[in-house]
Amino acid sequence: SDVWAHASNADDPVGSWRTSAAGTHAMALYESGAAKLWLNSPGPAVAEWSPASGTAIAADFSADGKSLVLSGTESGVIVVDLTKPGEPRVLLPYEKKNYSIIL
């Protein structure tokens, strides 16, 4: 798809990508941990997310192809309605926790 010409970035290569079940949207996860969403056609990303500090975003489309679920974003775990990608719903807010391991 032509969308990948826009998704490619020499400074931050695409680590993995997916298209929605309906084929209307494409999503890329970058080596930096960031994620971007496109309409599955040439043009700029319709939404992008940065990872929380020290994490990488994991994401996938819902089985019905109507939503994108992302974890590891600066907002936490979010669901994006593909008809309104700029209005994600936060399912679980990001909270930085420090853990101690006692051996």
Image (cartoon, grey):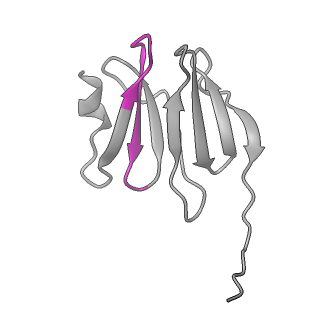
Q: Vertically, is 62 above or below 14?
A: above
Q: Vertically, is 84 above or below 57?
A: above
Give the x, y percent position of residue 81. Answer: 63, 20
Give the x, y percent position of residue 48. Answer: 51, 38
Rendering quarter of residue 29: top left
Give the x, y percent position of residue 66. Answer: 57, 15
Foreground of the two, 8 or 68: 68
Outermost residue toward the bottom in this view: 103
Q: Which residue is depicted at the point 36% across and 18% down?
A: 40
Q: How many marks?
A: 0
Residue 50 lies in the magenta stretch: no
Q: Which residue is depicted at the point 51% across and 44% down?
A: 58
Q: Vertically, is 35 above or below 63?
A: below
Magenta residues span: 18-32
Give the x, y percent position of residue 92. Answer: 76, 44
- On-image quarter of the N terminus: top left
Q: Is residue 70 left or right of residue 44?
A: right
